[in-house]
Amino acid sequence: YFATSLCGHDKGKRYMIVGERGEMVGLCDGRRKLFASPKWKKKKHIQMIRSETMAEAFSGLAGSEDPDRRIREAIAGLERQKEKKQED
């Protein structure tokens, strides 16, 4: 899944969810928060986003040489989908 931060200094920022520990989720954007060291945030502080892009991006993430690049590309694809829907 993807997620949008609902509160904090990163409010409105999009992330990919890469882990889960109880009430916390690990969030990566491929730039500041990397796959190797995700940002941990409470589930109540994010809005989850379902997308077809997610399945493509997550399938090869673990074995990828550069998972952060794949995360950046997936988030950019999500942004393009959103813009395309707004145009229609």
Image: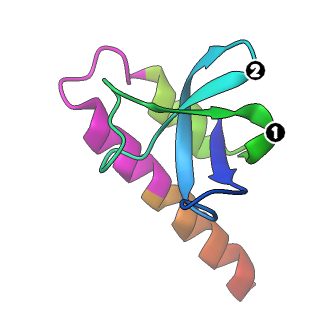
Q: Residue, x 65% and y 35% (percent of image)?
A: 1
Magenta residues? 60-75
On the image, the x and y values in percent for residue 41 come to: 62, 35
Contact between marks 1 and 2 (CB within 8 A): the answer is yes
On the image, the x and y values in percent for residue 4 come to: 66, 53
Q: Which numbered disc covers residue 23?
A: 2
Q: Nearer the viewer, residue 65 or 21?
A: 21
Q: Residue, x 56% and y 57% (percent of image)?
A: 78
> How many other residues sit within 10 Å of disc 1, few (<14), some (14-19) or many (≥20)?
few
Q: CA distance from mark 1 to mark 2?
A: 8 Å
Above or below, 65 relative to 80: above
Colour theme: rainbow
Q: Quadrant of residue 20?
A: top right
Which element carries disc 2, helix, strand or loop?
Answer: loop
> How many other residues sit within 10 Å of disc 2, few (<14), some (14-19) or many (≥20)?
few
On the image, the x and y values in percent for residue 79 come to: 54, 66
Residue where numbered disc 1 is placed: 44
Q: Residue furthest bottom?
A: 87
Q: Which numbered disc covers residue 27?
A: none
Q: Residue, x 71% and y 33% (percent of image)?
A: 42
Residue 19 falls within the magenta-colored stretch: no
Q: Quadrant of residue 52?
A: top right
Residue 74 falls within the magenta-colored stretch: yes
On the image, the x and y values in percent for residue 59 come to: 47, 22
Q: Amino acid at mark 2?
A: Glu
